[in-house]
Image (cartoon, rainbow, N blue to C red):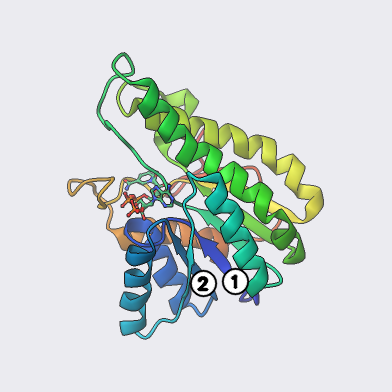
Amino acid sequence: MSLPSHPILVTGGNKGIGLEICRQLARLHYRVILSARSPERGQAAVARLAEEGLEVEFLPLDVGDEASIQTATRELARRHPALQALINNAAIAPARFGTILDATAREISETFTINTLGPILLIQALLPLLKAGKPSRVINVSSRLGSVQDMTDGWAAYGISKAALNAATRKLAPALAPQGVSINVASPGWVQTEMGGQEAPLSVEKGARNIVRLITEFPHDVTNRFFGEKDEIPW
Ligand SMILES: NC(=O)c1ccc[n+]([C@@H]2O[C@H](COP(=O)([O-])OP(=O)(O)OC[C@H]3O[C@@H](n4cnc5c(N)ncnc54)[C@H](OP(=O)(O)O)[C@@H]3O)[C@@H](O)[C@H]2O)c1
């Protein structure tokens, strides 16, 4: 695959899989914009990569806040004429092991706002930049726990939000295709991060690689699919 000339925006880039996606893309000489909701945590992550000899840009962006999405979009358009890719990585997983019978309205709605609505609103806002960078692509980082075919109890709000993100991807794919933008869902696998816990089998490097490979190995016209670590996952 040839290197994209326009930058790639990563949400939730200050830690975990998002930070490692930024690191791996920067090592491969992609232009990376690391975004984070906390300017302090985001700048600290950028500084950490700089110490490793990797230069990435910082953009403040809270995907759970519509005003922040609009501000970040304006700032991005001021800095760059186009985007090559958007990686919707940011997410939360409150009350992870809780049963759906105990899930609170607040928990469900907050998780949906960040994990599902955020990516949709961000794609809408960034569409002019993605169109300007076409062929461009969106990767929605989802989870096996969002596969409707494979639902079990636990991770209730999170599972619902990721299933809805997958459904949104199915809606977005035909809408974006005529604009020269492809969109896929990818699960990193179960990964050792704050969200995944230390008992997870995959390192953060491996988890991030499962997302980065969609940029480095997949042709631009692959769209509307749900990729796991090795195989495709049923919707
Ligand atoms: N780890 C796993 O086993 C696993 C498995 C399947 C899927 N995934 C998916 O992989 C992605 C990354 O997960 P992770 O394991 O790296 O989680 P993590 O370590 O908890 O990191 C989550 C990242 O999202 C950011 N974030 C949360 N809410 C945000 C908001 N409103 N605006 C902007 N950023 C926000 C966090 O920022 P703060 O530091 O400010 O909170 C953090 O940078 C997620 O989409 C997750 O669902 C993970």
Q: Amino acid at mark 1?
A: Pro
User: Viewed as shown, does residue 186 lie left or right of 121?
Assistant: left
Furthest toward the left, the residue is 199
Q: Earlier in the sequence, mark 1 or mark 2?
A: 1
| 93 over 105 or under it: above or below | below
Residue 128, given in percent of the width and then of the height, sits at 74, 58
- Element at label 1: loop
Check disc 2 and report its element: helix, strand or loop.
strand
Q: Residue at x 66, y 56 (%)?
A: 126
Q: Quadrant of the N terminus?
A: bottom right
Residue identified by numbered label 1: 7
Q: Does the numbered disc 2 mark a residue whose Cβ is under 8 Å from ligand 1?
A: no
Q: Left or right: where does residue 232 sit relative to residue 144? A: right
- Residue at 55 percent of width and 76 percent of height: 31
Q: Position of residue 55 (x, y in %)?
A: 44, 81
For the C terminus, give its image quadrant: top right
Question: Most extreme residue toward the right, as rendered?
Answer: 178
* Numbered label tally: 2
Q: Image point 56% across, 52% down: which residue?
A: 69
**Residue kind at label 2, given as amino acid type:** Val
The answer to which quarter of the image holds residue 205 is: bottom left
Residue drawn at (71%, 54%), measured in percent from left and top? Answer: 127
Q: Residue furthest top?
A: 101
Q: Which residue is more in the foreground, 152 or 113?
A: 113
Pick the front one: 6 or 38: 38
Q: Which residue is mark 2?
A: 32
Instruction: Check if mark 1's residue and mark 2's residue have beta carbons within 8 Å.
Output: yes
Report the front residue among 59 and 142.
59
